[in-house]
Image: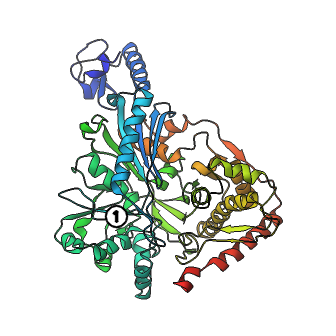
């Protein structure tokens, strides 16, 4: 069968009839070639049948580089997951509010997962038609262009060491300029102050950067640099839009902002589209020479993976953090509710925007209870404990371990558990922890409602914590909205796979992809609205009490 598809020369492949391809032929797209056939029905039917059969044996590989682990997920042409491999890596906490990763831990864990998933699924590298990358955003890596070695650990998106510089920028009146150019608020969450900290605190870094010897990249750029053996220093627009240095109106690195932060433009990567072929993986890495064809920051990738491609479509990802994004079309719009505007994925290669609310600690609250407090040995035990009680019994948990994100944007807020009584059990704390995720999401949705003037009809959800039925039901009760959970929760990886597959014609359109999706699970509101409003008011009171705590004691 495949012999008909291998040759791109000569006449009609099934019958051999000579033809002028442009005037008489029919094109059948495939990942690596065009099929030439004449217009006879028998030849067309035969080639289409062969093409479809051939596609079922091909795959797209998505690299999902997250905050606590690196995963590789293999997708078939039917959109289903063929295999998953995952490796966690060390979290580094050098100081209060500081979070780092070893860049080589990121790289090694990601490559190991990629090679492992092919072996587990018994898929040959040559049967992978494209590779998509999705990654934790904002996390900042600076490395030497000649040696490829990082000059410092990766400073993670959760890291708050840039707060003093952010305060100085705000005091100097830079917030409105930054907001109008980038759609972002001044916050240490974004890459700019992380880069500045490295240049100011790593010996010799400033001089080497000024000499053009250092490269900056978010995690996607670091992976691409290493996957291509340094041939490509490149990011995509969704990741660039998270640096606080990229002008998302004029579509370029902004020289005024670079000067404001004292960051040389020579450090910045080339900026590409989320769905386009950008280079081949070095064959010695064990992945063949597969084409890198999809790149997106994790939350924009999840938005695309949920097929939120029209204005008004919205999703929330329940991962380490929580991230609610709503597609707002091709017009740049600023928030009046302290949300941010960012770039969305665009297979059509035009600027499209999304409004976003970012929550720093979502599912990470479960990890904290497991690893730091040793309340549970497994994350799955949290749901079991929460189910052992009917409610949180007045316990409120504010998980502001690294400050509060949208819509509060308080880098000095502190984590807090309030409402403890003699009757409080571990189940109440577990339930309050899960509810804290839903409360934070509700804060963002209420703010977004005011901005967009488009009331939510439903909320599409994904991410690991979205599998928790207690959390999803409470979220529906709190919002008084239907919650739609897809059959496949791996929408972040799906988005990267879709972007890569579309770039090489593995799939023809988002409409084709939509037909592949399985049935969704719906959660409908069951609780009384007045009861939920009262719970929300208690949450807001607790948030106020947690606000500014670390600033007072610093």
Residue in front for this viewpoint, 114 or 239: 114
Q: Residue furthest bottom?
A: 172
Task: Say above or below: 365 vs 460.
Answer: below
Residue in front for this viewpoint, 162 or 131: 162
Q: Name the residue under label 1.
A: 251
Residue 403: in sight, yes or no?
Answer: yes
Task: Say above or below: 328 vs 502.
Answer: below
Instruction: Tell me which corner region of the image, top left, top right, bottom left or bottom right, holds residue 487.
Output: top right
Quadrant of the rendering where the N terminus is positioned? top left
Instruction: Tell me which corner region of the image, top left, top right, bottom left or bottom right, holds residue 235.
Output: bottom left
Instruction: Tell me which corner region of the image, top left, top right, bottom left or bottom right, holds residue 211.
Output: bottom left
In the image: residue 231, left or right of residue 181: left
Q: Position of residue 394 (x, y in %)?
A: 79, 68
Residue 273: in sight, yes or no?
Answer: no
Residue drawn at (67%, 79%) of the image: 545
Q: Position of residue 47 (x, y in %)?
A: 37, 19
* Label 1 neighbour load within 10 Å: few <14, some 14-19, many 20+: some
Residue in front for this viewpoint, 265 or 438: 438
In the image: residue 37, left or right of residue 94: left
In the image: residue 42, left or right of residue 483: left
Q: Position of residue 178 (x, y in %)?
A: 40, 76
Task: Say above or below: 3 vs 522.
Answer: above
């Amino acid at each position: 069968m495949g012999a008909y598809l291998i040759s791109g020369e000569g006449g009609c492949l099934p019958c051999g009839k000579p033809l002028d391809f442009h005037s008489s032929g029919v094109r059948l797209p495939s990942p690596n070639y065009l099929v030439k056939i004449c217009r006879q029905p028998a030849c067309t039917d035969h080639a289409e049948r062969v093409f479809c059969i051939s596609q079922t044996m091909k795959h797209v590989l998505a690299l999902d580089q997250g905050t606590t682990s690196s995963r590789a997920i293999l997708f078939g042409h039917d959109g289903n997951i063929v295999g998953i491999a995952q490796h966690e890596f060390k979290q580094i906490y050098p100081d209060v509010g500081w979070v780092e990763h070893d860049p080589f831990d990121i790289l090694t864990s990601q490559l190991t997962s990629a090679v492992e998933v092919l072996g587990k699924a018994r898929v040959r590298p040559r049967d992978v038609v494209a590779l998509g990358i999705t990654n934790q955003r904002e996390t900042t890596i600076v490395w030497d262009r000649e040696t490829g070695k990082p000059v410092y650990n990766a400073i993670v998106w959760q890291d708050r060491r840039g707060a003093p510089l952010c305060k100085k920028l705000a005091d100097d009146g830079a917030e409105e300029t930054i907001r109008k150019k980038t759609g972002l608020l001044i916050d240490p969450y974004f890459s700019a102050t992380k880069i500045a900290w490295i240049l100011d605190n790593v010996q010799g870094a400033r001089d080497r950067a000024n000499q053009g010897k250092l490269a900056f990249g978010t995690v996607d750029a670091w992976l691409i640099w290493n996957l291509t053996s340094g041939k490509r220093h490149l990011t995509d627009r969704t990741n660039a839009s998270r640096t606080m240095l990229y002008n998302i109106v004029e579509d370029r690195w902004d020289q005024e902002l670079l000067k404001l932060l004292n960051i040389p433009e020579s450090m910045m990567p080339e900026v590409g589209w989320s769905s386009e072929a950008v280079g081949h993986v070095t064959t010695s890495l064990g992945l063949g020479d597969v084409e890198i064809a999809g790149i997106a920051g994790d939350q924009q990738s999840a938005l695309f993976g949920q097929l939120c491609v029209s204005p008004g479509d919205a999703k929330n990802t329940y991962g380490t953090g929580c991230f609610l994004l709503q597609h707002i079309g091709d017009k740049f719009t600023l928030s009046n509710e302290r949300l941010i505007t960012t770039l969305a994925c665009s297979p059509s290669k035009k600027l499209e925007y999304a409004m976003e609310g970012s929550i720093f600690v979502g599912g990470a609250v479960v990890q904290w209870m497991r690893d730091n407090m040793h309340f549970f040995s497994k994350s799955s035990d949290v749901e079991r404990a929460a189910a052992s009680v009917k409610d949180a019994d007045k316990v409120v948990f504010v998980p502001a371990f690294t400050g509060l994100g949208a819509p509060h944007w308080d880098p000095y807020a502190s984590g807090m558990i309030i409402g403890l009584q003699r009757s409080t059990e571990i189940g109440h704390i577990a339930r309050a922890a899960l509810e804290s995720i839903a409360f934070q999401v509700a804060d963002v949705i209420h703010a977004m409602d005011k901005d967009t003037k488009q009331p939510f009809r439903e909320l599409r959800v994904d991410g690991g914590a979205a599998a928790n039925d207690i959390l999803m039901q409470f979220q529906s009760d709190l919002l008084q909205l239907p919650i739609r959970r897809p059959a496949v929760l791996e929408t972040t990886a799906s988005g990267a796979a879709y972007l890569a597959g579309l770039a090489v014609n593995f799939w023809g359109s988002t409409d084709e992809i939509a037909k592949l999706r399985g049935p969704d699970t719906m959660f409908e509101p069951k609780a009384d609205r007045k009861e939920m409003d009262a719970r929300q008011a208690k949450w807001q009171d607790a948030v106020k009490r947690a606000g500014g705590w670390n600033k007072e004691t610093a």
